[in-house]
Each structure stands twice: as C-alpha cells, then as structure tokens.
Image (cartoon, rainbow, N blue to C red):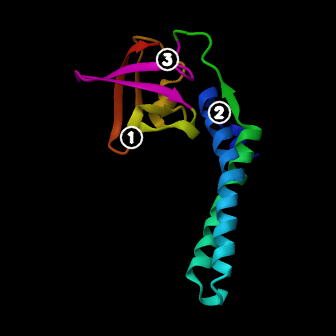
Amino acid sequence: MTDAQNTVVSQEKFDEMIQELEHLKTVRRTEIAKNLEYARSLGDLSENAEYQEARDLQAATEERIKKLEELVKYTKIITDGKRKSDVSFGSKVSIKKEGGAEVHEYTIVGSEEADMRVKKLSHMSPLGAALMGKKKGDVFTFSTPNGKQTYAIEKVA
C-alpha cells in the first residue's frame, strides 16, 4: 500500500494538484527540454555545469510528476458537506489551553494540505488526531515534545 492510498484532501487541494501536474507535464517539461538542448550546444558535457543543472532539474520535475500522478490516482477527496458537531475533515475548531485565555482556531485537513502558517492542521498530527471526533465542550490531552497538554474545545464549525 502506498502513502497516497492513505491521503485525504479537500476538493480545492485536489484541483490544485491536477493543475500543478498539468503545468509540470506541459510547460515545465518544455522549458527543461529547451534548457537541455541549449546546454548540449555548449560543448563537452562532462564539464558542463548548465547541462548538469538542467539534468538535475529534469530529474526533480519527473519525480514530482510521478508523485502527483500517484496522489491523483489514489487520494480520497473529503467533502465537508454535512456540518456536524463532531470534529472531522474540514471542521474549523477553536480550542483553549487549560488555564489559558488565548483561543486558537484551526481547520482540520489532510496531511498533503497541512500548513500551520494558515492554521491548517493535519488530521494525522498529534493535535489533529486528538481533536478528531471530539465535540464542543470536550476536554482532551495530547502529547507534545514539551509534555502532555490539555485543551478544551470552544467551538466546532
């Protein structure tokens, strides 16, 4: 079983992956082919830094295409159609640390689209996993590198 078979994403993220895949297969591959052709024209390939760089870029691009093709083939798209009171994919969750005043809000997403800069939390992260299935008012504890943390769920939307 591949990692892609365990991947879940929103429709928005799936569409982004399709768009990136198309760009890489059409535009990017063409750009790299032109760079390789130009680098070959410079002469001796054994001492040609431009040629080696273009080959490295080609390899990285082909690896990304392979990964995206596998993800697109096996990834499960999660829709947040029914708004439930339980924390699930697509839920916006507000939590507060026990004894704290600051409320943190996260959106629960699949690991492929997790991004803490925009408060998108993977369902597989320690906090995300601890939140799954909980309801407003639930108190839960999870382990962090700094020890166990206890939080209360303020809101689920």
Label drawn at residue 144:
1
Q: Residue 99 lies in magenta, yes or no?
A: yes
| Residue depicted at 72% across the width and 40% down the height | 72
x then y, percent, for residue 19: 65, 40
Q: Are marks 2 and 1 in contact (CB under 8 Å)?
A: no
Q: Nearer the viewer, residue 6 or 120?
A: 120
x then y, percent, for residue 87: 51, 18
**Image position of 61 (left or right of 143):** right
Which quarter of the image is occupied by the N terminus?
A: top right
From mark 2 to mark 3, how far is it between C-alphas? 29 Å
| Residue depicted at 67% across the width and 82% down the height | 41
Q: Residues within 10 Å of mark 1 (few under 14, many from 20)?
A: few
Which type of secondary structure does the marked residue at label 3 adopt?
loop
Between disc 2 and disc 3, whose residue precedes?
A: 2
Q: Are marks 2 and 3 in contact (CB under 8 Å)?
A: no
- Res 59 visible: no
Q: Residues within 10 Å of mark 2 (few under 14, many from 20)?
A: few
Mark 3, residue position: 134
Which type of secondary structure does the marked residue at label 1 adopt?
strand
Q: Nearer the viewer, residue 115 or 38?
A: 38
Mark 2, residue position: 15
Q: Nearer the viewer, residue 51 or 106?
A: 51
Q: In this rendering, which labeled residue sits more in front, label 2 or label 3? A: 2
